[in-house]
């Protein structure tokens, strides 16, 4: 097999892995050929693989990338489409199949490539190969580089920017305005916008300091956040029992006591969802988040709450910063976590919490 001078070592290793994967399939022969120059488009392709599946012959025209997000996939499509016609290789006519090869390809980029019927292969072993008379689809977990990129997007203060985008998804926002809403630096906000552009979840207008963004795919962003929920450590919380108190009365008492002691708080989970969009006939527990301080300990004391392992009717989660209270809403004198945060919290819950989450998303969040 000949190696291409314009392909680096990492890409050659990836293409070698592709050939090995193809050879591992039944009734398949694959051989790496020298890169070809397409006289029609003027493109030089990174590599070509001569492929035989049963009695059918194909030429895989390879476009190699390092990492592919939806935006990158769009840019690569036109490079791959020009050679997508038949050509003669020796005495045998072989169908030419465009194939994007990369160390990592995001789930959204894979969806796009499958919709456009363009093949792909990544270092995790995922392979999509559409052709006349042949259809190969191997779906494996995403490589660490993609999973790490997605995980980092939903970590630290970056989440506050995402939260702001979801809460204001119908608005056009500048970096400065978005940074103010998210309570983070413009630099952090700009980094997040770069990532969202790669996923093609936002649209832009204007130039320079006047450039504004709008979240065009709020459902995809929220779904991706949901996908990270199980991987994000559950915040520390304490369970209490407040004696002789109906849940609805307890919500009001907790809110009033926090307000009286001037301590920031927000009710979440079922108790908050019930006030946004009633779903259950009753709620057995009040859960809220609050900053830990001497004042918050005074709230617990004023409530007459005692720590318990079982039978708790009040659970307080430790907030890390004021950013944890972003976009909370005051309804009937009670601070409720934002619908987005309540939705995320409910997905960590038990019982019918997940059903309640879907009801909240449909009726209140709307995407």
Image: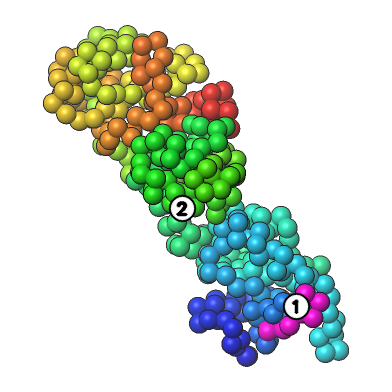
Please provide percent x and percent y for residue 260: 22, 13
Q: Residue at x 43, y 51 (%)?
A: 191
Q: Earlier in the sequence, mark 1 or mark 2?
A: 1
Give the number of the disc on residue 150. 2
Is the residue 255 above or below the residue 75 in the image?
above
Q: Residues within 10 Å of mark 1 (few under 14, many from 20)?
A: few
Quadrant into which the C terminus falls: top right
Foreground of the two, 211 or 148: 211
Q: Residue at x 53, y 65 (%)?
A: 67
Is the residue 314 above or below the residue 38 in the image?
above
Q: Residue at x 33, y 33 (%)?
A: 324
Q: Is residue 176 magenta?
A: no
Residue 114 falls left or right of residue 84: left
Q: Which residue is mark 1?
A: 42
Q: Residues within 10 Å of mark 2 (few under 14, many from 20)?
A: some
Examine the rendering and report whether any part of residue 30 can be seen. Answer: no
Is the residue 226 above or below the residue 249 in the image?
below
Q: Magenta stretch? A: 35-41
Please provide percent x and percent y for residue 140: 55, 61
């Amino acid at each position: 097999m000949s190696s291409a001078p314009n392909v680096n070592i990492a890409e050659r290793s990836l293409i070698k892995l592709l050939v090995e994967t193809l050879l591992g399939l039944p009734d398949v022969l694959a051989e790496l050929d020298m890169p070809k120059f397409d006289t029609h488009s003027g493109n030089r392709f990174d590599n070509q693989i001569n492929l035989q599946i049963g009695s059918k012959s194909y030429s895989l025209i390879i476009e190699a990338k390092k990492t592919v997000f939806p935006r990158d996939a769009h840019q690569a499509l036109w490079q791959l489409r020009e050679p997508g016609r038949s050509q003669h290789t020796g005495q045998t006519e072989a169908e030419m199949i465009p194939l994007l090869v990369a160390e990592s390809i995001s789930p959204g980029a894979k969806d796009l490539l499958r919709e456009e019927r363009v093949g792909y292969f990544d270092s995790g072993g995922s392979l999509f190969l559409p052709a006349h008379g042949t259809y190969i689809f191997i779906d494996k977990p995403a490589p660490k580089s993609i999973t790490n990129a997605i995980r980092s997007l939903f970590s630290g203060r970056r989440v506050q920017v995402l939260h702001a985008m979801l809460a204001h998804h119908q608005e056009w926002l500048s970096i400065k305005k978005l940074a103010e809403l998210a309570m983070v630096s413009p630099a952090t906000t700009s980094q997040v916008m770069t990532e969202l552009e790669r996923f093609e979840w936002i649209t832009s207008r204007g130039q320079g300091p006047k450039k504004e963004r709008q979240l065009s795919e709020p459902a995809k962003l929220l779904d991706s956040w949901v996908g990270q929920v199980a991987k994000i450590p559950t915040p520390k919380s304490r369970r209490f029992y407040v004696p002789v108190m109906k849940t609805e009365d307890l919500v009001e008492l907790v809110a009033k006591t926090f307000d009286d002691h001037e301590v920031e708080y927000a009710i979440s989970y079922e108790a908050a969802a019930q006030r946004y969009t009633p779903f259950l006939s009753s709620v057995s527990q009040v859960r809220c988040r609050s900053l830990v301080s001497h004042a918050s300990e005074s709230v617990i004391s004023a409530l007459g709450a005692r720590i318990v392992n079982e039978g708790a009717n009040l659970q307080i989660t430790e907030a890390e910063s004021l950013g944890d209270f972003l976009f909370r809403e005051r309804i009937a004198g009670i601070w409720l976590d934002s619908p987005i945060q309540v939705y995320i919290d409910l997905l960590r819950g038990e019982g019918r919490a997940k059903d309640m989450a879907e009801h909240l998303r449909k009726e209140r969040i709307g995407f």
